[in-house]
């Protein structure tokens, strides 16, 4: 509001000055319908408005000084539309410059599946949050974005008395090892998803240890075209066995809620939660929760 008020004062102050020039010196009339650059600088209860390139006079300059009822120093630079950016960044004033193509957000983390034998410390999540995205700068510190990414989840267990299994209909479940002579084994349920994240990112107005912090939040739609199950074990004689299937009855579409905390421009932490069960009944009803490190987002 303060900046909008400043701009209104500037326009009000400039209009009569130009009109007076036209009335007193008709041979030097200035066409003020277009202005290449407007600079408003305020300090110590005063503001100076400078117009560069008025109308067809590319080298012309008009300067006017007015008194203001507040303290502070701010600088604006705007094109002829008189659009003032929300945070005073001149680059954000150009609507075309607000749009950016972006990529980043390589993620490494751990995923938990409550109510299943999956062990979070051994269940990994690897993904590329935004292989290709489009972002829009609301201001110099705030952006919204939409993109496309990929994600792998590996729900793994090495418990001695339970493994992932699939019934005749491809429903994933867990039960005691089908090979009663198993001495050691590992069982995992893996999913691969294509994601479409929609995010809001806000940079902090301060720095810690010379690094800019940030937060981000949003949601992502997940298309899961593939899920598989694999168990490997050794029998009492030490022979290694494998048993798996790609015919897993899983949900094709799910969604995640995502939150991020940036420690710097290069590294941050993320939390991802799925409020939907990823596998159809009668598969175990669990809601995946994952957390980890995200790079270059």
Image (tube, rainbow, N blue to C red):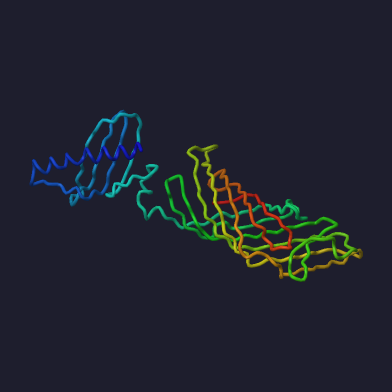
Position of residue 20 in the picture relative to residue 264 (left or right): left
Query: Height in image: 229 above or below 97?
Result: below
Position of residue 140 in the picture relative to residue 69 (left or right): right
Residue 267 lies, in percent from the top left, at 58, 47
Query: Height in image: 158 above or below 63?
Result: below
Quadrant of the snapshot with the N terminus: top left
Query: Height in image: 265 above or below 70?
Result: below
Comparing 266 with 254, the one in front is: 254
The outermost residue toward the front is: 281
Residue drawn at (50%, 48%) of the image: 201
Q: Quadrant of residue 187?
A: bottom right
Comparing 11 with 154, the one in front is: 11
Residue 241 lies, in percent from the top left, at 83, 67
Position of residue 198 in the picture relative to residue 22 (left or right): right
Residue 225 lies, in percent from the top left, at 63, 67
Residue drawn at (37%, 42%) of the image: 88
How many numbered marks appear?
0
Comparing 219 with 271, the one in front is: 219
Query: Height in image: 108 above or below 232?
Result: above
Residue 109 lies, in percent from the top left, at 66, 52
């Amino acid at each position: 509001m303060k900046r909008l008020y400043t701009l209104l004062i500037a326009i009000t102050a400039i209009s009569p000055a130009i009109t007076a020039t036209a009335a007193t010196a008709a041979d030097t009339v200035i066409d003020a319908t277009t202005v290449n650059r407007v600079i408003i600088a305020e300090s110590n209860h005063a503001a100076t408005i400078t117009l560069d390139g008025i109308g067809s006079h590319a080298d012309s300059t008009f300067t006017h000084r007015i008194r203001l009822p507040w303290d502070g120093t701010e600088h604006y630079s705007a094109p002829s539309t008189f659009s003032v950016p929300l945070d005073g960044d001149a680059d954000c004033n150009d609507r075309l410059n607000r749009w950016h193509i972006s990529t980043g957000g390589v993620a490494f983390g751990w995923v938990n599946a409550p109510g299943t034998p999956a062990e979070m410390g051994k269940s990994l999540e690897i993904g590329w949050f935004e292989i290709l995205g489009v972002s829009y700068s609301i201001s110099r510190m705030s952006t919204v974005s939409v993109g496309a990414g990929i994600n792998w989840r590996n729900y793994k267990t090495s418990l001695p008395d339970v493994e992932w299994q699939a019934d005749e209909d491809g429903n994933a479940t867990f039960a005691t090892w089908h090979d009663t002579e198993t001495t050691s084994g590992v069982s995992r349920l893996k999913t691969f998803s294509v994601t479409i994240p929609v995010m809001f990112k806000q940079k902090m107005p301060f720095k810690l240890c010379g690094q800019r912090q940030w937060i981000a939040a949003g949601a992502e739609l997940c298309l899961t075209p593939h899920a598989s199950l694999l168990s490997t074990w050794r029998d009492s004689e030490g022979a290694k066995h494998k048993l798996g299937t790609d015919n897993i009855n899983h949900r094709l579409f799910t969604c995640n809620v995502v939150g991020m905390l940036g420690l710097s421009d290069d590294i941050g932490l993320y939390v991802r939660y799925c409020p939907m069960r990823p596998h159809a009944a009668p598969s175990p009803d669990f809601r995946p929760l994952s957390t980890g490190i995200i790079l270059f987002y």
